[in-house]
Amino acid sequence: MDMKSFYQEHADLATIVTKLRGHLATANVGSSESSSAIAAELMQLSTKLTIHLGKEDLFLYPKLMKAAGPEKALAETFQREMGGLTEAYNAFKLRWGTAQRIAAEPEAFVREAKAVIQALEVRIKRENAELYKAAEKT
């Protein structure tokens, strides 16, 4: 399976995450300007992540589920794990989806954002190293 577009989407998501990390490192997360920029980045992340996950569900997982051997089990494990991460991200997005919410509680936002970002980064690295490598073999 050709995985170039999946890897590129991961690179695009990583770029957005890097921008978010940059915002989180500043002392003025709660400022109007900063919280607006962060909310815009979150919107972009959410959009790209939703499209990416949909593409995985439509193309990647069905392909791997038809494979014989360890690829199927790996896909099942990754898909099961993704449910929890998706729920956590959606809850985060609902809570912090606007500049006003971010500005109202910047310390809490930074704490939760760092946790979500770390979980996304770990997932992307694991998918690149394990899941996508398995898909390339099918």
Image (tube, helix red, strand yellow):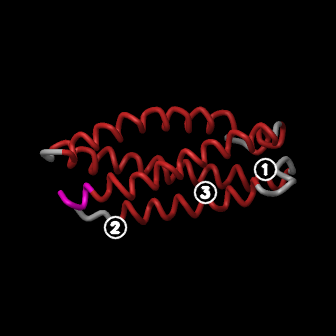
Residue found at x 63% / y 61%: 18
Nearest to the eye among marks 1 and 2: give it.
2
33 vs 15, nearest the viewer: 15
> Mark 2 belongs to which amino acid?
Lys
Label 3, secondary structure: give it.
Answer: helix
Q: Position of residue 96 (x, y in %)?
A: 69, 39
Question: Is 33 one of the magenta-colored residues?
Answer: no
Query: Over which residues does the magenta segment extend?
Result: 134-138
> Mark 3 belongs to which amino acid?
Val
* Of callouts 1 and 2, the N-terminal one: 2
Q: Position of residue 21 (x, y in %)?
A: 69, 56
Quarter of the image containing the C terminus?
bottom left
27 relative position to 102: left or right: right
Mark 1 vs mark 3, CA separation in Å: 15 Å
Q: Position of residue 26 (x, y in %)?
A: 82, 57
Residue 77 vs 47, above or below: the answer is above
Residue where numbered disc 1 is placed: 35
Residue where numbered disc 2 is placed: 4
